[in-house]
Image (cartoon, rainbow, N blue to C red):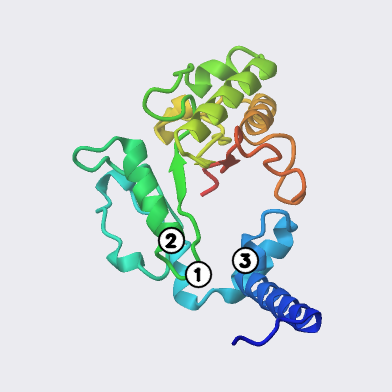
Amino acid sequence: PPLPFTGAMRGTAAAVLLAAGMGAAAAAAPPLYKTPGAPVDARVADLVKRMNMGEKVNQLVLPFGAKFPHDYTSFNSTGLGGTYPLAPLPGQTWWETRNEWQRHAVEGTRLGIPTSFIEETLHSSYEGGTNFPMPCLQGSTWNAELVQQAASVIARESRASGIDRGFSPVLHFCTDPRFGRCEESFGEDPHVIATMGVAAVTGLAGKGGPGAASTYLSDPGVQIATEAKHYA
């Protein structure tokens, strides 16, 4: 006959099960960089110290999405820093193709770093987004509040289409038509360009900044990172 299961034995079994459960929970705990509630600076520091040289280098790679092959071979272990939107695969929408790529980046690479999807956000987001007037016309309104509101819409629509970073605003002074692409500039006057540039960045990224980790992209669901240009 089986031995009687005494109260002391029950207590021992419970303690063993509890310890096993705690050990499993500890083993399953995500690394700091994958912990959403942890401070951003601490998460970044934790991730960077885990990265090897190849992973760091490939975070600086940014191929043109439309011409970039949908081939994960080169980035199987390292991931890819960023790309313009990938051309849809046959039978897929752009979002389905992007999600497939992102799924590989998160689940199929060593550290699971998502790819950054980038667009020119000068006056619109992505295909199907609202087309606002070009910055040269925005600047001629002398209405910074309106520019900020337009940029806010662009950011919201960008996020909805999977874009997290925009190559705008343009802050160079278009004082000579030989510069080219003058329609991307807010104008010729430094004060107007600075004022409109601040308005555009505020609409796209919010009122924080990279030096204020607690407020930068305070609402990432409707805000995107910005890259003011062209300094070179």
Residue furthest left in the image:
90
Q: Answer left or right for 87 relative to 178.
A: left
Q: Is residue 38 visible?
A: yes
Q: Pick the residue in front: 96 or 201.
A: 96
Looking at the rendered structure, the kind of residue marked 2 is Glu
In the rendering, at what x and y percent does residue 157 appear? 50, 27
Q: Residues within 10 Å of mark 2 (few under 14, many from 20)?
A: few
Looking at the rendered structure, the kind of residue marked 3 is Pro
The structure residue drawn at horizontal position 69% and vertical position 34%, both measured from the top left corner, is 206
In the rendering, at what x and y percent does residue 170 appear? 54, 35
Relative to 34, say whether 181 is above or below.
above
Relative to 175, say whether 217 is above or below.
below
In the rendering, at what x and y percent does residue 73 appear? 28, 66
Q: Answer left or right for 45 relative to 87.
A: right
Mark 3 = which residue? 30
Looking at the rendered structure, the kind of residue marked 1 is Lys
Mark 2 = which residue? 107
Q: Is residue 188 visible?
A: no
Mark 1 = which residue? 56
Element carrying mark 1: helix
Placement of the N terminus among the 4 image quadrants? bottom right
The structure residue drawn at horizontal position 56% and vertical position 23%, both measured from the top left corner, is 153
Alpha-carbon span between mark 3 and mark 1: 21 Å
Q: Residues within 10 Å of mark 3 (few under 14, many from 20)?
A: few
